[in-house]
Amino acid sequence: MQIHSGFEISLRAGFPKGTKSAVCVLAFILAMATAKDVHLDAVLKGNAEFTKTLYQALSKEKGNVFFSPISVHAVLSMVHQGAKGKTQQALTNVLKVPGPEESADGYERVMKSLNSVKNVTLSIANKVFLKNKYVFKASYAATIAKNFQSEVESVDFEKKEEAAKIINTWVENKTNNRIKDLVNADMFDELTRLVLVNAIYFKGKWSHPFPVAQTQTEKFYINDDEIMDVQMMHLTKNLFYKEDETLDAKVLELPYSNKELSMIIILPNKRNGIHELEKKLATVDLSTITENMYKPEVKVSLPKFKIETDVMDLTQPLKDAGLEQIFTDEADFSGMLDNPERLAVSQVVQKAFIEVGEEGTEAAAASGDLEMVPMSAIIAPPKIVNVDHPFILLLESRGAGERNILFQGRVLQPAQ
């Protein structure tokens, strides 16, 4: 499996009243907790709440949905560090964190742990492209370098094509060339002052690969009227599973070779139950979705699929979430630059990619662990999870008792 994305916020200055002033583009971030810490816990819980808010907005659109909420959360947290007054408070409220200092401390732990994960290829990087001849306040520069591991590069945004090429090349390099053309020249002008970019690359193999020989063409029921042929993978294994009566859905966990990373499948019991499920998930703490699971033998049928989103404009969803303040000429980001200019955000976008197959992304096979299971699990009939209709997926990490949602998606039509 591969997952990639990129994120950018470009802030502009010198705008007349009522003029928007910045551009933001998002990529995927994977965050993993390694030690229990109050500030880390605050970031993870904040991201879980932020995930629900953003997903509810994005799910109003038709078709597949796939995004990284923590990618948006992390880059907005970088902006949070330079916000003051009502702008800072608005970001605190929406990000669901105690404050910028606590958020920065939590993200320092997130960044360190993400870039040290074993048995999968996982990397995360931040970079700030700053208009030439502009300088950050020393305190802001120190925070984004230390806590967010962010590099800074000087760019002439008035040379729009060149600036776009520089940023897109960096994103491509950080996502193994999966995310291309994240930004375009039209996003920049003489008022652009800085662009914050985050990129994530993940490539992982299943802990229990799906046997290639068992993949075959089967039906996938998009809705009551539409059916499509898919390449359906099959696996029988002892896996964490539960029937969730509240959601009227089955919940299944598929671990990766590093078992601190897993994909959670939430399958409505009704073929046309996806929208009802989404409404119910709006009231659920997603970080607890895998509680009370047990490990029976499960027969899984899962379609191979690939989702590559267009650049999604997240501006209106973020305004609806309570961040109207950062997009207006009343925004206060005076904690960022030494130069005495007013800054505001004009646009936030994200582009994402995910591909799921029998082995993950690599063709090499992976050995499964020898597992001891209760005798009742051996003689009981296996649970059936036939993912032949629309479902929700979460990709999450866990460590030291903390769980964190890295990606969320809705698969209505598993393109192959």
Image (cartoon, rainbow, N blue to C red):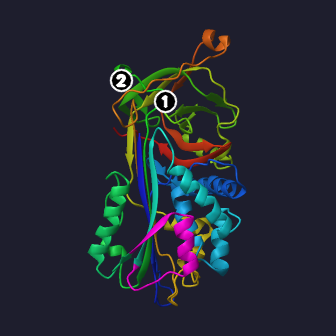
The label shown at residue 60 is none
Q: Which residue is mark 2?
A: 212
Q: Quadrant of the C terminus?
A: top left
Pair 1/2: label in front: 1
Task: Decide: few, some or many residues near mark 1? Use Cα within 10 Å; few <14, some 14-19, many ≥20.
Answer: many
Left or right of 185 in this view: 14: right
Q: Secondary structure at mark 2?
A: helix
The amino acid sitting under disc 1 is Ser
- Write the start and end of the magenta stretch as one range: 131-153
Q: Residue 351: where, in percent of width, then height?
A: 41, 57
Q: Can residue 25 be seen from the camera position used here?
A: no
Q: Can residue 345 be seen from the camera position used here?
A: yes
Residue at 31% x, 74% y is: 163
Does the magenta segment cover residue 146? yes
Q: Which mark is first along the chain, 2 or 1?
A: 1
Residue at 54% x, 69% y is: 144
Does the magenta segment cover residue 101? no
Residue at 52% x, 68% y is: 145
Asked where in the image residue 251 lies, by quadrant, the reply is top right
Q: Residue 245: where, in percent of width, then height?
A: 69, 32
Q: Residue 13: where, in percent of width, then height?
A: 46, 86
The amino acid sitting under disc 2 is Val
Q: Which residue is mark 1?
A: 207
Residue at 39% x, 22% y is: 211
